[in-house]
Image (cartoon, rainbow, N blue to C red):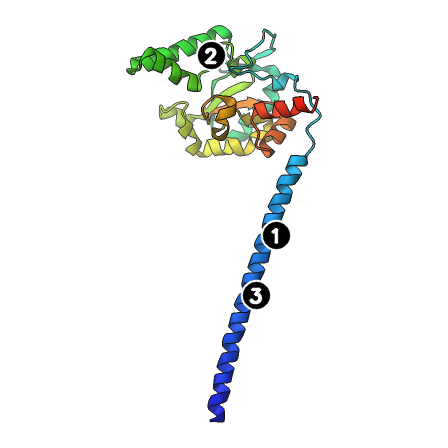
Amino acid sequence: MYKKVSIVLLSLTILSGCQFSGTTAESNKDTSHSKEIAKDTATKTKKQEDPLPNVSSNNWNLILVNNDHPMEAIETPLKVLPNGLQIDERMETDYNAWMNAAKEAGFNMVLVSSYRSYDLQKQVYNQSISDNQSQGMSYDDAVAETKKYVAFPGSSEHQTALAIDIVDDEWLATGKGLIPEYDQTASQKWLVQTMKDYGFILRFPKHKEDLTKISYESWHFRYVGKENAAYIIDHDLSLEEYITKLQEAGK
């Protein structure tokens, strides 16, 4: 009898110990989760409190061009690249460094489009409308579709010579061209991961379309300089939002 009672008591002790241990584990898990939440909140708060870079919203690399801010008549120093396309010569060093780094990472990038004059942008815009009509769209529908991806002449970032459309050679060889699905490639993911190290941002991200007024473009990158790119990306801002913050701060 005593032996049986002892076994029962021992079994209860073990079960009780397991239950207590489980409760402690859950408690530790809850505490750890709470700490993670607190850490994330602190990080977000810190980012919100980060001081803005000591720059002016009027700097050459922050020029804002969109449908609400047409391109002004300014003289831009242009650099002709080996493929005949042009970029602002002040971004050449960072651009070349980025493309060389891409090559070292195993990606052969192709610059599809960069600087466009007003006349060239007008040609691109009208050609897009024509192409859409050839696919059976009415003129109004063709214009509406064009506006999703092609800026009206005078309102294109490409006129700044700071915007570049780039994809890798393998993607280009498929004939798919400049479409959002390019973001499924390893090269595009690499570009997004490294862009701020070279002063670039993804100009038209999918979650900022209501602000940029341009549909998501996974291939369109914009040079803003390293300091500006770091702040914009770290704080998940569009260029429009960043410039507004600078202006509100009197910069």
Give x and y (percent) for residue 97: 58, 26
Give x and y (percent) for residue 212: 51, 22
Q: Amino acid at mark 3?
A: Thr
Determine whether label 2 and label 3 are within 8 Å by CB: no
Kindly identify the residue that appears in the image at 45 percent across and 26 percent down.
Answer: 216
Residue 174, placed above or below residue 136:
below
* In the image, farthest residue toward the bottom: 1
Give x and y (percent) for residue 231: 63, 30
Which quarter of the rendering shows the C terminus?
top right
Q: Which residue is mark 2?
A: 152
Mark-to-mark CA distance, 2 and 1: 50 Å
Nearer to the camera, 217 or 110: 217
Q: Which residue is mark 1?
A: 35
Kindly identify the residue that appears in the image at 68 percent across and 35 percent down.
Answer: 49
Mark sitting earlier along the chain (2/3): 3
Q: Amino acid at mark 1?
A: Lys
- Residue 24: assigned label: 3
Kindly indicate the quadrant of the structure image that contains residue 133.
top left
Kindly identify the residue that appears in the image at 42 percent across and 27 percent down.
Answer: 180
Give x and y (percent) for residue 35: 61, 52
Q: Amino acid at mark 2?
A: Phe
Mark-to-mark CA distance, 1 and 3: 16 Å
Kindly indicate the quadrant of the structure image that contains residue 177.
top left
- Residue 186: assigned label: none
**Badge 3 density bin: few <14, some 14–19, many ≥20, Cα 10 Å:** few
Kindly identify the residue that appears in the image at 37 percent across and 12 percent down.
Answer: 129
Q: Secondary structure at mark 2?
A: loop
Determine whether label 2 and label 1 are within 8 Å by CB: no
Mark-to-mark CA distance, 2 and 3: 63 Å
